[in-house]
Structure formats: structure tokens, C-alpha cells
Amino acid sequence: MPQVHLCRSESLSAFTRPALVAGHPGHELKVFGWITQQMPLIYLLTDGSGGLGVSRVPASAELIRRLGAWPGEVFGAISDTRIYQAILEKKTPFFLEIVNLLADSFVRHGVDFVAADAVEGFNPTHDICRPLVAAAILMAERHTGKTIAHYDVRLTEWERKVQEMHDDQCLHVVLDNELLREKLAAAEEYLEMRDEVNRAVNHFGRDYFGIECMRKVTHPFVPPWGTAKPFYECRGEQQVANGKYRDVLRFQEHMLPLMDAISEYAARAASTATQQGSLAYR
């Protein structure tokens, strides 16, 4: 069984209904041991189909079933192309509906702990995940009067060639040798993720993935990279120059207005819920 090493005073055993919200199927592999231990509800924003149009939802659904976890009401119904276009077109109602669905589900299931994709500036779907989750948490908290712990999971340190830094904001699940072997075997069997997993293992080594880190979210609507361009914006410029994409998805022009709108919506809805005692945001 995995062991929990705490860098914070909170204990994972104190939570009875945890949840994971991921931008793409396959992200659950990063916290394989935690899922095995806690059996959370798992929500997937997209189907992970990318530009090829092949959904990763069946692979994730089978993995989640094997681990004893449960799919949430939001589970891979949106294609990557659709969410990317919704960001480009700043379709605020599209994202607010996701917030509503998550908030409803958190209340319905009594969710008291949520881990979600971290904002890393690598992929816009990853990055939009956290404000959506933060908004849903705020609304659910106001409705129930109960606190929901909010942590994030970093996904792309091997792509960015940086190693996770740990401090008193972290919760760690440490896998024993057998569970680490099972985790890496599951990652190898997940065909759509195999190349990414191999790059990660080649960069950091197998033992690196025996520590699963979740970090306390303190500023859910503030990007961590300051004024620098996120990676996805620089990559988008290259793809447009190569003729692959027509438009560049930009943080200031596309992502930030959506994040602000999501934050403002949650604050208004939470205030209404406090006054009326219900999730009156439809």
C-alpha cells in the first residue's frame, strides 16, 4: 500500500469523498497510487482526442474501473478541438456550464477534497481546468457551508525539463516498489500515453514517479509565470508560421478574459447561494 508523507498538517485520511478533475484522459496516471488508495470520483474535461480525433476516454474508463474509482458527471464528452475553439472564441457560457456541472456534482456527492491539473503554461486545457475547478469549489462551499480542500497536480515537468520542488504546501503519496511497478506497467499499457511516459521516465528515471505530489492551491485565478509568454503561445506561433494552425491562442487575449469571467461568475453565484441557500445560478 502507498504511504502518505505529509508536508502539511492536513491528512488525506481526513477526507471521505475526494475527486480528481483532469483536462485530458491519461492524467490520472500521474496519481495512480493515490487513486488506488482513495478511489476518488474522476472528472475528465475532454476526450483527449487531440488533432487525430481518437478519443482516449475508453482507455481511461477501463483504468479507472480497474482501480476502483468512479467517473463523475463530466467525463470526456468534449473534444480537444471543441474546447480549443471555445477558448479562441471566448465562449464564456460554454465554460460556465462546466462550472455549473462540477459544482452540482461536488454538492451531490459531498466532495470534500479536489485535486486538479496545475496551471503550468504548457497546455491551455490544463490551465483552464484550475479556474473551472476553483469556481465550482467556491460555489459548492457556499451552498453547503463546508470547506473543500483544493490541490493541484503538476503534469509537465519532464516536458519543461524542471523537477518538482517540494515544501510545506505539498501532500505526498509514496508508493512501495510493487505499486510503482503497477503504475509504470499501467502507463506502458496506455497506448496513447506511451511516448509521453517514456520521455518522462527517460528524463527522470523510474523512481521519480514513486512520489505523487499534490500542492495546496492558494491563488487559483493567478497564473504563476508573471508576464512571460506561456509555452503554448510560443508553440502556437510556430504552428501558425508552419501553416498548421490559423490562429494563435494567447494568454492575454483569450485565456485571461475567460479566467476573469469564470472568477466573477463564481463570486456572484456564491453570493446568491449564500443569500438563498441553494445553487441558484442557472
Image: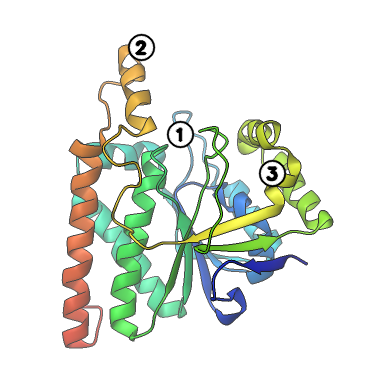
Circle 3/circle 2 CB separation < 8 Å: no
Q: Residues within 10 Å of mark 3 (few under 14, many from 20)?
A: many
Mark 1–mark 2 Cα distance, whole angstroms, equals 18 Å
Q: How many marks?
A: 3
Which quarter of the figure is the N terminus placed in?
Answer: bottom right
Give the farthest residue toward the top: 242
Is any part of residue 268 visible from this angle? Answer: yes
Name the kind of residue labelled 3 in the image.
Ala
Residue found 23% across the figure and 67% down from its top: 266
Residue labelled with disc 3: 187
Mark 3 vs mark 1, foreground winner is 3
Query: Residue sitting at 44 percent across and 29 percent down?
Result: 51
The image quadrant where one finds the C terminus is bottom left
Left-right relation of 53 to 101 = right
Mark in the foreground, 1 or 2: 2
Q: Earlier in the sequence, mark 3 or mark 1?
A: 1
- Please tell me which residue lies in front, 5 or 141: 5
Which mark, by number, is residue 242? Answer: 2
Q: Which of the 4 image quadrants contains residue 234?
A: top left
| Spot occupied by residue 96 in the image (x, y as percentages of width and height) | 25, 59
Q: CA distance from mark 3 to mark 1?
A: 19 Å
Secondary element type, mark 3:
helix
- Amino acid of disc 2: Asn
Q: Secondary structure at mark 2?
A: loop
> What residue is shown with label 1?
50
